[in-house]
Amino acid sequence: MLRPAVLRRLSPRLGGFAVPAGCGSRREVASGVPPTGGTSPRALNIFDRELKRKQKNWAARQPEPMKFDYLKEEVGSQIADRVYDITRDFPLALDVGCGRGYIAQHLNKETVGKIFQTDIAEHALKNSLETDIPTVNVLADEEFLPFQENTFDLVVSNLSLHWVNDLPRALEQIHYVLKPDGVFVGAMFGGDTLYELRCSLQLAETEREGGFSPHISPFTAVNDLGHLLGRAGFNTLTVDTDEIQVNYPGMFELMEDLKGMGESNCSWNRKPLLHRDTMLAAAAVYREMYRNEDGSVPATYQIYHMIGWKYHDSQARPAERGSATVSFGDLAKLSDVMPEGKKQ
């Protein structure tokens, strides 16, 4: 039952904590997690963040957590590739919602001098993967980053921001801790993630129980993400989508892996349990509607990749409106003045 072997990409990629000046490789765990129940006053309280912390801690304490790391490893490598595409070095970086450190292991110390890794799950930080980059682990919530303004040259985030209650605030916090001309490179699950599982559960529950409850967490729409980044203060934005499909023996193996990833539903309005016959019916619906020729069933993970920069005077800016000296209408006349030999 080696699910990582069948991971397949479907489409191409279209005021607080003072950071010490030293760059030693010693790992530390500091705390920046707000009190239980602490949320932004303006936030919609959709997710039980304390339950999510317990889910991630449980997953990190399993005997073989790496068995379930395949998806976050893949997306972590994609984020690292995007960092390498930026032709500069980053003396100080921050990984927001790092889990076990799926991005840092793909970076090198020639590109990143030192990285701070933050997560709400202390056991994920304690069991983080080894990397050549000097690393400091900080127990902190994505919505309450305990760092001072203009601290980091680079901020990254791998499949974590879809669990925050206040995504605008989280993006504002990331923008706040970035230095001018710093860059944010992140990825989060998109709205079509696990649509096969969502449809199967809804159909089975409607047929067996006369209605359905949400069993898959809500996700951000891609057309909203660029707006949220711009509202947080980022410019020169890039947002693109990717889809990764993983084949599983059946629906129950998929749900086992989601639990092992720490990605179980933690919505406040989730249904505490499903009846056994409803679960069996959902597995049958899943297999009947989506099964592959070899008998396995696919699960689709839609990934939103985003890049945003914090403003600096040195960045290229569009010219002022009305400052053009040539109109587009004049371009049509170029063929009349070009020599015959240069016309294509």
Image: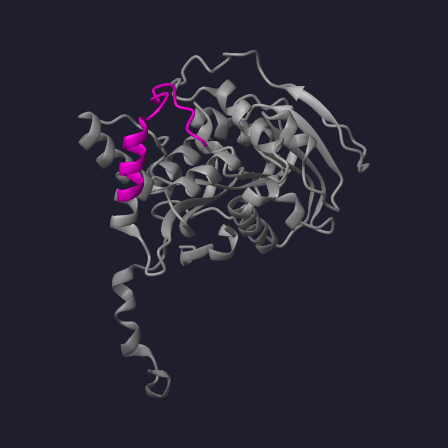
| Residue 96 falls left or right of residue 259 | right
Coordinates of residue 40 in the picture (x, y in percent): 46, 15
- For the point 27% across and 78% down, which residue is it? 336
Farthest residue in the bottom direction? 341
- For the point 43% across and 27% down, which residue is it? 168
Magenta residues (range): 264-284
Q: Nearer the viewer, residue 168 or 249?
A: 249
Coordinates of residue 24 in the picture (x, y in percent): 82, 36
| Residue 339 falls left or right of residue 121 | left
Would you place residue 111 above or below residue 53 in this image?
below
- For the point 26% across and 37% down, which residue is it? 281
Would you place residue 252 above or below residue 5 in this image?
above
The colour scheme used here is one colour
- For the point 37% across and 51% down, which residue is it? 298
Q: Nearer the viewer, residue 2 or 320?
A: 2
Coordinates of residue 265 in the picture (x, y in percent): 41, 28
Coordinates of residue 287 in the picture (x, y in percent): 30, 48
Would you place residue 67 above or below residue 63 in this image?
below
| Residue 88 falls left or right of residue 190 | right
Q: Residue 105: tell me if it is visible.
A: yes
Q: Nearer the viewer, residue 271 or 190?
A: 271
